[in-house]
Image (cartoon, rainbow, N blue to C red):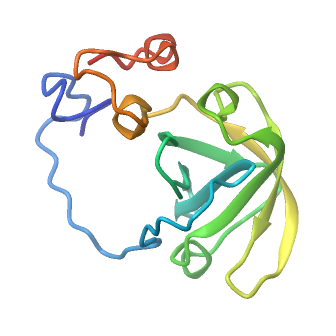
Amino acid sequence: MFRGHLERSPNDVILPDITVQIKRIVYKHEFSPKDKRPENLEYILFGTPDELFLAHRIVAPGEFDQLLPVKIAGQQFSDTDLSQGLHVVVSGRPNASSSRLRKGQDSTAQLIRANGESRNITLQPALEVYFEESELAVPPPLLSEDTQEERDAGFHH
């Protein structure tokens, strides 16, 4: 397992000798030129009842990719819940990398289930495992160029 980008920093191994087997896909999205970026931060919640993660929901070019562990105060999720890739919207936080969730910054969000049912939750993010912005930029920067957010997060190319 790697922290960061496998293709750019293959020596940043944090768990050596791990074999990964994909058991289920919890979310997929086919991109369309008509898609508009959401105004607020949006994430997909997935994992196991004891180990939750958020992945930033990428809808259009120019967004950012982020993966981070999270705890959700006072909530318990089943494997069935988490297999659906629950939608999380952080209202009042612009959909920009500089506003992304970060360790130590608890946030109120709305959890939206596939059936449309929603409720407020409190997110307690941990240290992000992955963050990438430059690969999704429009126009793309030179391969050697990091964004300021990538440098601040410690994800250098």
> What's the residue at 79%, 39% (across, down)?
93
Image quarter in which the N terminus is found: top left
- Percent of width and height locating residue 135: 34, 35
- Percent of width and height locating residue 124: 72, 39
- Percent of width and height locating residue 114: 67, 82
> What's the residue at 42%, 72% (across, down)?
30
Q: Is residue 25 left or right of residue 43?
A: left
> What's the residue at 70%, 30% (across, down)?
99
Q: Is residue 10 above or below residue 45?
A: above
Q: Is residue 84 above or below residue 61?
A: below
Q: Is residue 142 above or below residue 138?
A: above
Q: Is residue 101 left or right of residue 147?
A: right
Image quarter in which the C terminus is found: top left
Q: Is residue 95 left or right of residue 5?
A: right
Q: Quadrant of residue 137?
A: top left
> What's the residue at 25%, 21% (across, down)?
142
* Of the pair 154 and 64, the residue shown nearer to us: 64
- Percent of width and height locating residue 32: 46, 69
